[in-house]
Amino acid sequence: MSERPVRLTRSAFRLFRPIATRWMDNDVYGHVNNVHYYSYFDSAVNAWLVEEGLLDIGTSPVVGLVVESGCTYFESVAFPERLEAGIAVAHLGRSSVRYLIGIFKEGAEIAAAQGHFVHVHVERATQRPVDIPARTREALTRLA
């Protein structure tokens, strides 16, 4: 078994996005269920890509598919808390990018949860890996 990751602080991330918890995110134990963290990861990164003009969800010829993800939980969060997702690029390859994401209670210095996911860029039509587009690579480099 691998060692538990070190709990990260805000300084490990380059960009922060607000995340609104929803009533339905809470489970019977009164906290956000683990499955929702993966949705927070995906929503934070893809909203940034859309806002940067790097992704048109319906028509972009190159899209990123998630091929790996993971999350470590340090403290519970619950609706109606406000959260922030910190985003950084941990690795930038030819066709793939590994994002590091931290979930913070609004204004908190240390992550309540943190994880990663890997996007492999593929041609939408063929689903075959392709080089990360130049504009996307440039923007991702700013998050490294």
Image (spheres, grey):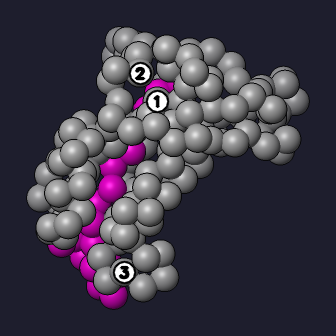
Q: Is residue 59 above or below residue 101?
A: below
SS of the residue under disc 1: strand
Q: Which residue is mark 3?
A: 60
Mark 1 residue type: Gly
SS of the residue under disc 2: helix
Q: Which residues are magenta?
A: 113-130
Image coords of residue 39 (percent x, y): 59, 48
Mark 2 residue type: Arg
3 and 2 marks in contact (CB < 8 Å): no
Quarter where residue 48 is shown: bottom left
Q: Which residue is mark 2?
A: 10
Return the disc, 3 or 1, that comes first in the chain's sequence.
3
C-alpha gap between disc 3 and disc 2: 32 Å
C-alpha gap between disc 1 and disc 2: 8 Å
Asked if one can make out residue 32 in the rendered structure from this viewpoint, the answer is yes
Quarter where residue 94 is shown: bottom left
Q: Which residue is mark 1?
A: 102
Q: Residues within 10 Å of mark 2 (few under 14, many from 20)?
A: some
Q: Residues within 10 Å of mark 3 (few under 14, many from 20)?
A: few
Q: Nearer the viewer, residue 12 or 40?
A: 12
